Image: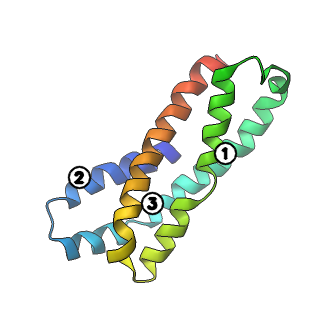
Amino acid sequence: MGLGSRLTFMFLGIAAGKMDPEKRREFMTSAFPISLMGQYGLLLLVLTGGYLMTLYWRALGDDPMLLAKLLLVLGEFTGINSYYRHKVAQGNAKAYMPTLIMLGRFALLTSLAIVVLAVPVFH
């Protein structure tokens, strides 16, 4: 769900790139409810991942990919995007939207890395 919402924002951003700047900000701001899906997905990832990790806690020090996946999930869970999204929604779009776009791209790459690392770790 988190990766899906990030991919959705990527394609919406591509479509919004052809709009004038004011319309683009309004369009992307109106799409913010989609990001709630990503937050719920991240919450589910943490809850189910905690359960899945019960068998792997002892192996944490021996498996660098598992450790990398855990650190990426914890880094993703900090809520930096939520803070900037809230600032944009308050009317500070011109100041905070470029930072939010950059963080969104980073979050997309992080989400992809989490999925890629999860395959060999939990296979």
- In the image, residue 91 lies at what x, y percent? 40, 83
Cα gap from disc 1 to disc 3, whole angstroms: 21 Å
Local packing at callout 2 (Cα closer than 10 Å; few below 14, some 14-19, many 20+) is: few
Point 65% across, 20% down: residue? 121
Amino acid type, mark 1: Leu
- Which sits in the foreground, 1 or 91? 91
What kind of element bears circle 3? Answer: helix
Q: Is 73 on the left-hand or right-hand side of 14?
A: right
Residue placed furthest toward the bottom: 91
Q: What residue did someone put label 3 on? A: 34
Q: Nearer the viewer's eye, disc 1 or disc 2?
A: 1
The C terminus: image quadrant: top right
Residue 1 shows in this picture? no
Point 44% across, 54% down: residue? 103
Cα gap from disc 3 to disc 2, whole angstroms: 16 Å
Q: Nearer the viewer's eye, disc 1 or disc 3?
A: 1
Residue 94, image quadrant = bottom left
Q: What residue did someone put label 2 on? A: 14
Query: What label does residue 74 carry, if any?
Result: 1
Local packing at callout 3 (Cα closer than 10 Å; few below 14, some 14-19, many 20+) is: some
Residue 95, image quadrant = bottom left
Residues at discs 1 and 3 in contact (Cβ within 8 Å): no
- Which sits in the foreground, 42 or 109? 109
Amino acid type, mark 3: Ile
